[in-house]
Image: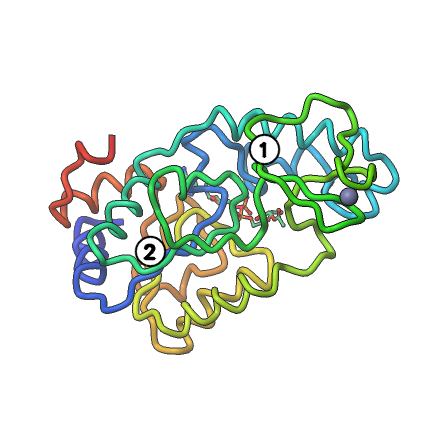
Amino acid sequence: MTPRDIAEAGRLVRESRYLIAFTGAGISAESGIPVFRGPGGLWRKYRPEDLATPEAFKRNPRLVWEWYRWRMELVFSAKPNPAHKLLARLEEKGILKAVITQNVDCLHRIAGNRRVIELHGSLRRVKCTRCAYKAEIRAPPKEDLPRCPICGSLLRPDVVWFGEPLPEGELREAFLEASKADVVLVIGTSGAVDPAGLIPLYAKKQGAKLINVNPEPNRYTGIADVEARMGAVEFAKKIAIVLGIGEASLG
Ligand code: OAD
Ligand code: ZN
């Protein structure tokens, strides 16, 4: 990434009519939440089919809950970093219209973004495996196997597991936002998981420009109009200067 690329990213953002952001685990990496793929990624240490599928939960709910309790602990103690804050400032200024995220940590909302579409659910919610019960939580459940207060069945984290469909309304809204966007800020995602990973490609097909912020090459490398080969926080600080947002307001 050269200074010209940052300037170009800044120009695209400033001149956009309808800017959206599409984010993944990488935007929260510098908040202390591990990513899934690549160096230090969770899927290098654990097998998704043991922990993040409905079958795994049926087989061994205790193990699945243990893993999720650990991830909930991380998420509950994490704070938004300057990259989350940049997106909140951009929405405040009326430039950013929506954040579409694959993350389950709620850090976009905590940073102050109002228009957040969560495609993969939230670790700050549980839901019943049998009835319609759903609840916000403020801390990981204390019990080994938390149960539904209505029907007594097992509760589970309200996240999307492999083999499960994405929430229909959120998915529809995300594609609608992508169709309206003229610039998409893609931050911290491998793009490896569909259908979410298709969203930037769909936006591009509809004529949007892509800014791809990632220290590593990913699915959008070679397609993106600006390739920002750096961490999310470094990018946020640099583009904040170009946009005159003031680095201090990201602190
Ligand atoms: P991945 O773990 O697949 O990708 C994380 C991306 O972040 C990688 O491309 C890294 O290079 C990049 N990265 C690492 N550190 C970064 C930093 N400091 N700043 C910016 N980028 C950084 O995570 P996702 O793309 O979010 O699914 O994964 C998609 C889905 O796969 C997740 O939502 C999850 C997972 O299995 C479900 O839970 C359904
Ligand atoms: Zn229930």
In the picture, measured across the screen, residue 154 lies left or right of residue 120, that is right
Quadrant in which ligand 2 is drawn? top right
Residue 26 to residue 13: above or below = above
Instruction: Kindly indicate whether the residue at mark 2 contacts the one at mark 1 (C-beta within 8 angstroms).
Output: no
Instruction: Tell me the residue at 85%/35% (across/down).
Output: 60
- The numbered mark at residue 137 is 1
Q: Residue at x 34, y 71 (%)?
A: 208
Element assignment for label 2 = strand
Percent x, y of residue 20: 35, 60
Instruction: Give the total of numbered labels.
Output: 2
Q: Amino acid at mark 2?
A: Glu
- In the rendered structure, the answer to whether residue 85 lies left or right of residue 189 reads left
Cα separation between marks 1 and 2:
38 Å
Residue positioned most to the top: 142
Judging depth in this view, the residue of 132 and 216 nearest the camera is: 132
Which residue type does callout 1 highlight?
Ile
Q: Residue furthest front?
A: 150
Tell me residue 12's x, y (percent).
Answer: 22, 62
Q: Position of residue 146 (x, y in %)?
A: 75, 30
In the picture, the disc for residue 3 is none
Toward the bottom, the furthest residue is 206
Label 2 CA crowd tier, 10 Å (few <14, some 14–19, many 20+): many
- Whether disc 2's CB lies below 8 Å from ligand 1 is answered no
If you read the primary sequence from the N terminus, does the residue marked by circle 1 or circle 2 appear first? Answer: 1
The residue wearing badge 2 is 227
The quarter of the displayed image where residue 143 is located: top right
Image coordinates for residue 22, horizontal then vertical, percent: 42, 56
Q: How is the image coloured?
A: rainbow
Q: Nearer the viewer, residue 164 or 234?
A: 164
- Height in image: 48 above or below 207? above
**SS for callout 1:** loop
